[in-house]
Amino acid sequence: MRGMTDTDALTIFRQTGALLEGHFVLRSGLHSRQFFQCALALQDMPTVERLGNALAEKARSLGAQTVIAPAMGGLVIGQEVARQLRVRFVFVEKEDGKLALRRGFRIAPGERILVVEDVVTKGGRVQETIDIVRAYGGSVVGVAMIVDRSNGTVDLGVPTHSLIRLIIETFPPDQLPADLAKIPAVKPGSK
């Protein structure tokens, strides 16, 4: 059986209504005409299993012992990738405005860890997660994401895998095109 293509994954997002069109403010602060609301695609467990399997297959050769995901966006897909790889799953979450490893989770020195996220635009939360893993002495073997909005231009310094890799125009808030500036902006993602 062939692996999932960008087209296959985009079809899932369109069918589930998870690819939104309009004027959106991304977590990065940039503005965009498109927004991937992964939560809509990931509310259906067969879809979660299918996307998780495709990501797990792309990352399997990295030999991760543990999957870590930033909350909230990476939780569902991170747990499914860990299940498909048959490895431990942990997550980081906000504490005092920054991501932190909490809830008694531990990372052993040298532990081989795969970071899993739903959507990456500039990679800020993924980089923050990588930094946390390294601060605990873990070894980040790679990053897997459903959507890479940078089309591979974000360099996280480790192997990266994605199901959808494309460039979607983004704009700083003070450089909006006229058509986008006329539409009220919404911020549908996690804060």
Image (cartoon, rainbow, N blue to C red):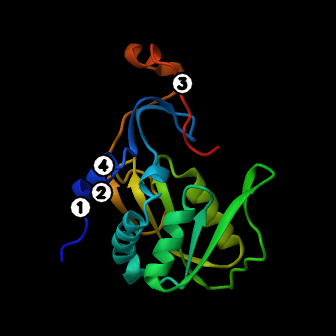
In the displayed structure, 69 sits above or below 66; it is above
Write down the residue under mark 3: 173
Closer to viewer: mark 3 or mark 2: 2
**Mark 4 residue element:** helix
The Cα atoms of the two marked residues, 4 and 1, are separated by 15 Å
Write down the residue under mark 4: 15
Q: Is residue 111 visible?
A: yes
Q: Earlier in the sequence, mark 3 or mark 2?
A: 2
Q: What residue type is labelled 4?
A: Gln
Closer to viewer: mark 3 or mark 1: 1
Residue visible at 26% across and 56% down?
A: 6
Q: Position of residue 103 (x, y in %)?
A: 77, 72
Closer to viewer: mark 4 or mark 1: 4
Is mark 3 in CB contact (under 8 Å) with mark 4? no
The Cα atoms of the two marked residues, 3 and 2, are separated by 29 Å
The Cα atoms of the two marked residues, 3 and 4, are separated by 30 Å
The Cα atoms of the two marked residues, 2 and 4, are separated by 10 Å
Horizontal relation, residue 56 to residue 116: left or right: left
Q: The C terminus lies in which quarter of the figure?
A: top right
**Mark 3 residue element:** helix
Write down the residue under mark 2: 9
The Cα atoms of the two marked residues, 3 and 1, are separated by 33 Å
Write down the residue under mark 1: 5
Horizontal relation, residue 54 to residue 138: left or right: left
Residue at the extreme right: 96
Is mark 1 in CB contact (under 8 Å) with mark 2? yes
